[in-house]
Amino acid sequence: MNNVGMVFGRSGAETPASSGMTLVESGYLSGDIGDSKVLDVSVYQIYLLFTREITISSGAIRGFRAIQIARSEDGGFQRQYLASSTNAGVTITNGADSITLKPSSASYDVYYALYAVL
């Protein structure tokens, strides 16, 4: 028996269907206690990282960003802002195969979501 899968109108042998963006990890970082988070970006080829930074005292948005992360054939990666606010409440640092997120001061909390695209 031969199974046929359909993806965007194409037919062919059964293959895993692409489900679009996959949530890799999301969470919350407290500026009060100096939270930080290391996100592994070694598995997929392209990622999207979203952050929302909040001023703790008022609950107002301090900043937000959307960042594309792309791995190269040599194993490294680069990141580029797709969009970002003028103000920032997060510090983002590249590692060898990771990105570290940390509130930029004790005055800000950070919410984040990392998605794999490819």
Image (cartoon, rainbow, N blue to C red):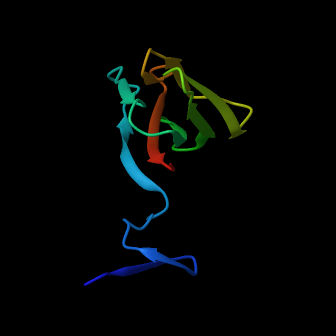
The quadrant where residue 2 appears:
bottom left
Task: Report whether 61 appears left or right of 1.
Answer: right
The quadrant where residue 90 appears:
top right
Identify whether 55 is placed above or below 105.
below
Nearest the viewer among 46 and 25 is 46
At a point 37% along the width and 31% down the height, the residue shown is 30
How far across and down, in percent of the image, does residue 109 sit?
A: 45, 34
Identify whether 18 is placed above or below 67.
below
Task: Report whether 6 appears left or right of 84.
Answer: left
Task: Report whether 17 appears left or right of 73.
Answer: left
The quadrant where residue 32 appears:
top left
**Quadrant showing the N terminus:** bottom left
How far across and down, in percent of the image, does residue 81 sit?
A: 68, 34
Would you say residue 84 is visible in this rendering? no
Would you say residue 100 is visible in this rendering? yes
At a point 51% along the width and 50% down the height, the residue shown is 117
